[in-house]
Amino acid sequence: MFTTPNDEAAVVAFREVGKSYGTEATVVHALRDVSVDIRRGEFTAIMGPSGSGKSTFMNVAAGLDDVTTGGVFLAGQPLHAMDDTARTILRRQHVGFVFQSFNLVPTLTVAENVLLPFELAGRSVTPQQRTWIDHLVHVLGLAARVDHKPAELSGGQQQRVAIARALASRPAIIFADEPTGNLDTRSSSEVLQLMRSAATEYGQTIAMVSHDPIAASFADRVLVLADGRVVADHGRMSPQQISQLLLTAEGVPA
Ligand SMILES: Nc1ncnc2c1ncn2[C@@H]1O[C@H](COP(=O)(O)OP(=O)(O)OP(=O)(O)O)[C@@H](O)[C@H]1O
């Protein structure tokens, strides 16, 4: 139905995607005719007013939710043509997540949390991966905390553990959902700088949903959704420019 996109260039490709909820009488069109690529190696911010479709976009891109119409490719694979099990396997292979609420397992140590994706995928850690993880733990300032439980860490430290966990398996893409939503200004800035460096230094593809123009100013690209459509697509911008862009998007009629 859709030509398979070049997955070297596009980690995620949306092709004429529609996503609706509810029945005919109560239908909500959360995404409407969205065709966009999340490009490899870029840090993309996904913005837009409340209810504009950002979470739906992320859930569909990560294969957590199915499309109603159109096609979504993740790492060149057609998510729209797969069942739940196949999508889960693909997600475990290619996707990392960072959430506002950190989503660490409270009973596990920092080290165990970072290794959790390998456990879940039933993969053992190779010596090269072990070196990479040790490097990440060091760079993220967590070396002295590896045996601690999440509750013993600050919010900023917990989010750094979540970033280490997301980066550990070098996924094709990391989805970050309001990753700084629960952090103070200083910790936010550290976390955003880490994500920025992951894209620049390791070529890590990142898609971040955020309301915050300062957070989005760390991204290479700013996509704005309004009423389920992509209404703006820009390169790197200042927080002021992003605020202005969002004011314009707020004005798009539903
Ligand atoms: N499971 C669902 N059932 C019914 N409607 C839904 C469901 N999930 C989302 N919606 C609707 O789809 C639209 C888009 O929702 P979505 O959560 O993607 O927006 P958002 O931009 O992430 O919003 P916010 O910034 O408030 O989190 C909204 O109108 C929402 O009410």
Image: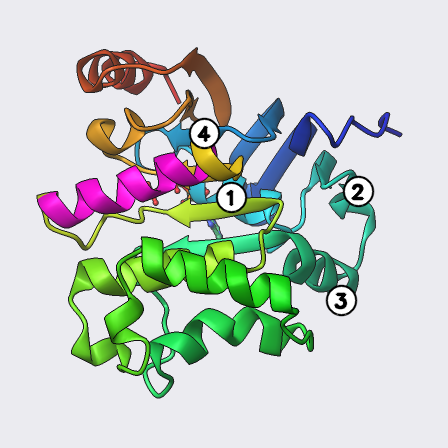
Q: Main secondary structure of the magenta part?
A: helix
The mark that comes first in sequence, 3 or 1, is: 1
On screen, residue 198 versus residue 23, left or right, reads left
Could you tell me which secondary element the residue under label 2 belongs to? strand
In the image, residue 110 lies at what x, y percent?
35, 75
Residue linked to disc 4: 44
Residue linked to disc 3: 85
Foreground disc of the pair 4, 2: 4
Quick check: marks 4 and 1 in contact, CB under 8 Å? no
The mark that comes first in sequence, 3 or 2, is: 2
Tell me, yes or no, whether the highlighted magenta stretch contains residue 196. Answer: yes
Residue linked to disc 2: 78
The residue sitting at the bottom extreme is: 107
Range of magenta residues: 186-199
* Image region (quadrant) for ligand 1: top left
Quick check: marks 4 and 2 in contact, CB under 8 Å? no
Task: Say which amino acid is labelled 3.
Answer: Thr
Q: Is residue 138 visible?
A: yes
